[in-house]
Image (cartoon, grey):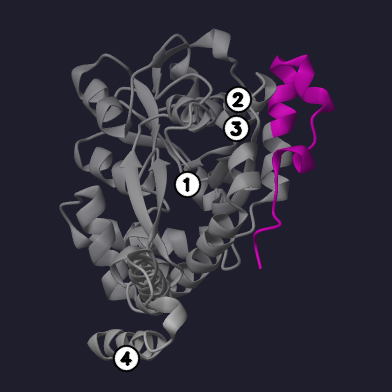
Amino acid sequence: MELAEHKLFKSFQRFKTFKSFVRSKTNKVNIQRLFHFLFLCFYCLVVPSGVSAQTTVRIAFNGFGGVAPLYLGQETGIFKKQGLNLELVFIPGGSLSLQALIGKSLDLLMTGGPPVVNAYLQGARIKIIAGVTNLLPYTFVVTSGIRSTELIKGKKIGISRFGSNTDYVVRLALNHFSLTPNDVQIIQVGGSQARLVALQSGAIQATVLSPEEALVAQKLGFGVLLDFIEKGIEFPHVNFVAREDYLETQPQTVRAFMKAYVETVRYYKTHRTEAVKKIMALSKLPERQMAEVVYEGSLRATPDDGKPTLKGMEVVLDAAAKENPKAKSLTVQQLMDLRFLQ
């Protein structure tokens, strides 16, 4: 940089030999201003190549399913290569985090299909731009005294929030048990840890938990009445969601993010040791075996190309239409914008 400044200075020394530039103090001032202006232009052209600015993308997630690849991508510099810095925020409950997205406190949100459908029907201008996990990863867990589906009737079942993934899955389980929501008491409890505590205290008698959480529950003496994981049901468990205005005003950022994300997924799937360690750290799992279970399940549930499950979204829409007539005219295509996937 000192060499470049020296050359520019020498050039202006030659300019001073011209009479038109040395006849008045005014021209001397103009030369100084011109020198500083050109030096500034030179600096702006040369320096950014070494210290390019990073664009921060603020992303919220409702649970730790599907988020480990993002942390790995951030730490290994995959997102940095695309000029991005991720700011990851945990917000329990899809409906609550959607409020933050709609209120422009977030750029992107990782959440399930049911909350997206509910918000869209209420007027939210949002789109699913990619799929993170496309299989239903829940287990229906019950207290030790419940050994058959008939005993679920009249019991209190905990979910995170109404309109959330857990709300949808509980209703799906009840349908499998030939029961309706009117046959039980569905209660908003909060995140998975809060629901596990509620099970232990007897405040609820059943809930749905992720695979690793179900392992913890079983070690505490709780039973499993239904395992959706074994069934391999397509379900939009976690998706990347964005506001329509963000997609229109920041298309380059979104495209760069999706490019980095797909590369991150490949890294996650081919670096098992790093991935399992990250899962353990994020979920605070006490045993590596639990993290291994999560990792194995994610390999199948996470699409390599970032595409969401269309079949799973259709199932969610069909369920929504039974409770909200407005959902009958809604299509999967209206809820998605996949132009940023390569």
Is residue 125 or residue 298 the one in the foreground? 125
Q: Residue furthest right?
A: 329
Q: Quadrant of residue 54?
A: bottom left
Label 3, residues with CA under 10 Å away: few <14, some 14-19, many ≥20: many
Q: Is residue 232 left or right of residue 156?
A: right
Q: Secondary structure at mark 1?
A: loop
Q: Which residues are magenta?
A: 317-342
Label of residue 127 in the image = none
Three-letter code, disc 4: Lys
**Does the magenta segment cover residue 331?**
yes
Label 1, residues with CA under 10 Å away: few <14, some 14-19, many ≥20: many
Q: Is residue 81 left or right of residue 247?
A: left
**Residue to which mark 1 is pinned:** 137
Alpha carbon distance from label 2 to label 1: 23 Å
Label 2, residues with CA under 10 Å away: few <14, some 14-19, many ≥20: some
Alpha carbon distance from label 4 to label 2: 64 Å
Is residue 28 or residue 291 the one in the foreground? 28
Q: Earlier in the sequence, mark 4 or mark 3?
A: 4
Label of residue 116 in the image = 3
Q: Secondary structure at mark 2?
A: helix
Mark 2 or 1, closer to the camera: 2
Quadrant containing the N terminus in the rendered view: bottom left
Q: Measuring from the top left, give residue 48's x and y in whole percent.
A: 38, 73
Alpha carbon distance from label 4 to label 1: 69 Å
Q: Measuring from the top left, give residue 166's x and y in whole percent.
A: 47, 30
Is residue 206 or residue 87 the one in the foreground? 87
Main secondary structure found in the magenta portion: helix
**Residue to which mark 2 is pinned:** 119
Mark 4 or 3, closer to the camera: 4
**Residue to which mark 4 is pinned:** 10
